[in-house]
Amino acid sequence: MKKLLEVKNLEVSFQTYGGEVQAVRGVSFHLNRGETLAIVGESGSGKSVTSQTIMRLIPTPPGRIKNGQILFDGEDLVKKTDKEMEAIRGKDIGMIFQDPMTSLNPTMKVGHQIMEVLTKHLKMDKSAAKERAIELLRLVGIPMPEKRVTQYPHEFSGGMRQRAMIAVALASNPKLLIADEPTTALDVTIQAQILELMKELQKKTNTSIIFITHDLGVVANVADRVAVMYAGKIVEMGTVDEVFYDPKHPYTWGLLASMPSLDSDDKSELAAIPGTPPDLTNPPKGDAFAPRNPYAMKIDFELEPPLFQISDTHYAATWLLHPDAPKVEPPEAVKKRLRKLSSNYPQPVIVKESE
């Protein structure tokens, strides 16, 4: 598959009164055409900063890109001027934000906000733009689009506002769509509808998607590949099957073990990852996850682990994958969660039981 986006050794920091926060520390990944990549991790792991840096939306100052490349269709976005990025944003790269009420203009009718994209980037006249806006509202599942196109955001429900935000993002047929926690503020029923909508739209438009979330529960339904971030770094990356059913990093184990189950027969308590993420004004030496890792070895506190290759598509940054490391299996809580997942999602299951 041909790569649409390639991020290489990206480093982003923010200058604060408390010092320089190293929010993104050497992140590298790629996205193929028509593919969905989910980036998951706790709050503060660097997910949103990474996505906003791709769009060149981080405020400068206090933020700055210290190092790295963002190759989009072969061109480095880091080297683009603000004016050049204005032509790319909305046209070639669209973004869906977490809260549509802070993204949609409350003083403009929803239809006008969609039409603005069409007239600016696709040079449509107002009549054609209005017809296309109605089509887009219908496409994202908003009833009575002819009426809704003339209404304001406050006249929409939360789920409808998110659908309208998707319509705005898709208006110019972007090659890349970045969805930054687009379902967090919605109830589970509307969340499922929005996720299903995104999957259907991707099939129709072949748009590549980066899906940012802290909720592993939504990942299995929408993503082709998963990147797990911790303390500004990618600590594990692989296909959905590999990360969900054969996880290798203790942090991924912790995330999977802490996923809630809707099974009424499951009386077990949710596992929790002890401790808190590190202060990135002074990143720790060695593996940043070591203080929270019950399987940490001496080397974890001294040297940062490289990304060990497990398969052609699966990588993890943990010293437990070193040939000389002791054999450690995922804890029983993780294995139990994997068995639950296998009954919910029909992906191939790879669960290695202890002998």
Image: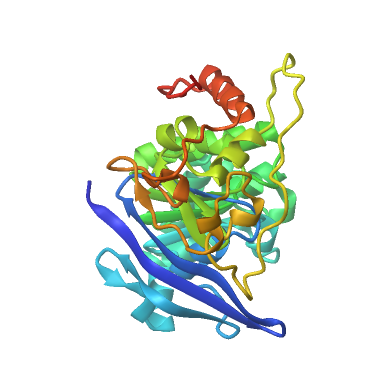
Q: Position of residue 9 (x, y in %)?
A: 38, 68
Kindly identify the residue that appears in the image at 72 percent across and 47 percent down.
274
Kindly identify the residue that appears in the image at 27 percent across and 71 percent down.
75
Q: Nearer the viewer, residue 263 or 54?
A: 263
128 sits to left or right of 144:
left
Kindly identify the residue that appears in the image at 64 percent across and 61 percent down.
44
Q: Nearer the viewer, residue 268 or 10?
A: 268
125 sits to left or right of 75:
right
Kindly identify the residue that appears in the image at 72 percent across and 41 percent down.
272
Total numbered labels placed on residues in the image: 0
Q: Nearer the viewer, residue 79 or 102?
A: 79
Q: Is residue 97 above or below residue 261?
A: below
Q: In this view of the protein, can residue 13 be seen by the observer?
A: yes
Q: Position of residue 52 (x, y in %)?
A: 52, 66
Q: Position of residue 249 (x, y in %)?
A: 50, 44
Q: In this view of the protein, can residue 55 be seen by the observer?
A: no
Q: Nearer the viewer, residue 175 or 254?
A: 254
Q: Position of residue 92 (x, y in %)?
A: 36, 62
